[in-house]
Image (tube, helix red, strand yellow):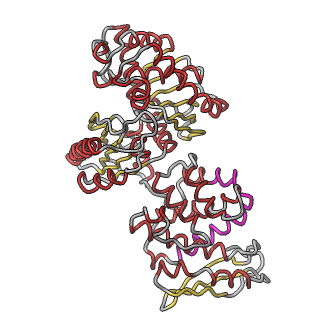
């Protein structure tokens, strides 16, 4: 569903270093008319290694910043979508921040994966630079992570997220922002060790244009402008930064070993004076790893990509009751790599979706949950790639650890993984840490969707496609009626399905019975 012309939307990027707000009106052509931008430097994340804990002070600063940004968005009557990246993504106590954001700032913050972050950044870049017909390498340097993506037009071809960011590197190599020659050499080697395997993955795709979309890269470009012209634009877009110009900026910041000394450098925001060395060395590493001759600065980044994604997809599946194109393509790619029984998995998924639709009046879930069920159905068997024993548990870990599920945020990936995990064996219970961590509404989603998937899997137990279509009748008992192909023997399927009704019965509060209907004539569709 596309956003209507005149609608006002807002996106908040909850980053490791800064929180950014952009408010925009949907234009008659479907583009964005920017109404307002705002930024708060929060330094939410910290730690030289894994950012596993948000301090109380950092959470307080973050909530206060969110309050202000949400208030600004509300003054425009905007619908707000907020996404969190590295710092919240990695924090073990992220629930505290998310709960306080909802309760005190009035905004539900989505935690997105690194590759989803890269996809959304790419959307913004394509809009800002009009590079629909070119293959681009996109780099976004954040405080806690760096996202790299190769894409063509609106489609990402490959994306990677690495735990390299200007805040993280500063705290590891340049405490207090102080840089000496040994620390610089160590930082360069560290960056190279992370980027080399990423280059190995992405370089085979090739690229025609390198694009940089972060505040760090824009700042370096602005500093270069000051070096050449004695002035810099407030907002940079489509400005080119060459390797030689980057080297000049690096020489300049390394000649000023302390944050205090760097504050005199033209074009450098003093709030970045402690982290600019790490950011510049990280960008240098990208140039070297990917053989970048020059990089084009995009004025749009994650927050604009979030807006475009919301405006053009409505944040849900499309009107045909299928996963949105990006989501579905990423699910199918994973299934192609891991799944040995594609016809069986596809048939099971079709049966699960039929049952979901037949029970719509009972569960009252919608397209959002249907998308999750479709993804879980297509991926429920990927754990067999590791081992057939306890493959449902392996499926959970394969899905949960995948960095290729584009279009899904972290919560949605977790729900898909749990539905796949509970396809068989033990029922969901509070004693399972992952299930216990869900809120009440998400537990209900997992129970219902996994209950449906269990029965659908049972109804193709022999891999014969004997059961063609499903209907359901809700009364004192929930009766699932199966139409079979002409001449097919579905005895095993019906028996298995009736043995696997417990979870759906728990989710619906009704006893469940699976029965056979009139066979479908041979050759008929269904």
Kindly report the secondary structure that dominates the magenta region of the rendered protein.
helix
Res. 226 visible in picture = yes
**On-image quarter of the N terminus:** bottom left
**On-image quarter of the C terminus:** bottom right
- Give the residue displayed 46% in from the left and 27% down from the top: 212
Choose top left, top right, bottom left or bottom right for residue 365. Answer: bottom left
The verdict on residue 460 being magenta is: no
* Residue sitting at the far right: 487
Camera-nearest residue between 304 and 458:
458
* Residue sitting at the far bottom: 476
Res. 295 visible in picture = no
Camera-nearest residue between 404 and 50:
50
Choose top left, top right, bottom left or bottom right for residue 362. Answer: bottom left
The verdict on residue 333 being magenta is: yes
- Give the residue displayed 66% in from the left and 87% down from the top: 517
Residue 82 as seen in the image, left or right of residue 343: left
The magenta-colored residue range is 332-358
- x then y, percent, for residue 75: 20, 46
- Give the residue displayed 29% in from the left and 52% down from the top: 101
């Amino acid at each position: 569903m596309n956003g209507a012309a005149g609608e006002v939307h807002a996106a908040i990027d909850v980053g490791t270093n800064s929180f950014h707000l952009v408010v925009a009106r949907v234009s008659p052509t479907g583009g964005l008319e920017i109404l307002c931008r705002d930024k708060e430097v929060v330094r939410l994340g910290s730690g030289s290694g894994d950012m596993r804990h948000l301090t109380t002070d950092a959470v307080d600063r973050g909530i206060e910043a969110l309050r202000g940004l949400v208030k600004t968005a509300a003054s425009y009557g905007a619908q707000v979508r907020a996404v969190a990246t590295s710092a919240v993504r990695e924090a073990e106590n992220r629930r505290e921040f998310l709960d306080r954001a909802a309760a005190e700032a009035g905004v539900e913050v989505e935690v997105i994966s690194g590759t989803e972050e890269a996809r959304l950044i790419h959307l913004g870049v394509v809009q800002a630079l009009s590079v629909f017909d070119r293959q681009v390498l996109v780099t976004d340097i954040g405080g806690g992570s760096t996202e790299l993506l190769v894409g063509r037009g609106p489609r990402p071809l490959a994306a990677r997220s690495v735990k390299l960011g200007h805040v993280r590197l500063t705290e590891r190599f340049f405490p207090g922002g102080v840089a000496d020659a040994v620390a610089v050499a160590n930082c360069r080697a560290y960056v190279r060790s992370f980027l080399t395997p990423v280059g190995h993955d992405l370089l085979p795709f090739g690229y025609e244009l390198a694009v940089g979309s972060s505040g760090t890269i824009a700042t370096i470009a602005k500093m270069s402008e000051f070096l050449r012209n004695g002035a810099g634009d407030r907002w940079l877009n489509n400005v080119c930064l060459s390797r030689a110009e980057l080297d000049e900026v690096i020489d300049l910041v390394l000649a000023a070993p302390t944050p205090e000394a760097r504050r005199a450098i033209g074009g450098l925001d003093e709030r970045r004076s402690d982290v600019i060395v790490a950011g510049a060395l990280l960008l240098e590493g990208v140039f070297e790893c990917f053989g970048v001759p020059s990089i084009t600065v995009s004025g749009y980044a994650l927050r604009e990509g979030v807006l475009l994604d919301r405006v053009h997809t409505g944040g849900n599946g499309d009107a045909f009751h299928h996963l949105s194109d990006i989501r579905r393509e990423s699910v199918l790619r994973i299934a192609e790599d891991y799944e040995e029984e594609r016809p069986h998995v596809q048939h099971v998924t079709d049966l699960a979706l039929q049952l979901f639709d037949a029970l719509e009046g009972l569960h009252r879930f919608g397209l959002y949950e249907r998308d999750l069920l479709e993804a879980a159905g297509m991926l429920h068997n990927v754990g067999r790639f590791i081992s057939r024993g306890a493959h449902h548990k392996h499926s959970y870990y394969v899905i949960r650890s995948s960095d290729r599920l584009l279009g899904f945020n972290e919560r949605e990936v977790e729900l898909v993984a749990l539905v796949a995990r509970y396809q068989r064996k033990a029922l969901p219970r509070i004693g399972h840490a992952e299930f216990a961590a869900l809120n009440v509404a998400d537990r209900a989603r997992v129970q219902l969707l996994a209950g449906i998937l269990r029965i659908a899997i049972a109804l193709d137990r022999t891999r014969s496609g004997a059961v063609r279509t499903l209907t359901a009748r809700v009364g004192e008992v929930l009766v699932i009626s199966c139409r079979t192909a002409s001449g097919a023997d579905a005895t095993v399927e019906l028996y298995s399905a009736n043995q696997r009704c417990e979870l759906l019965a728990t989710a619906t509060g009704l006893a469940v019975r699976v029965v056979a209907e009139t066979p479908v004539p041979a050759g008929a569709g269904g």
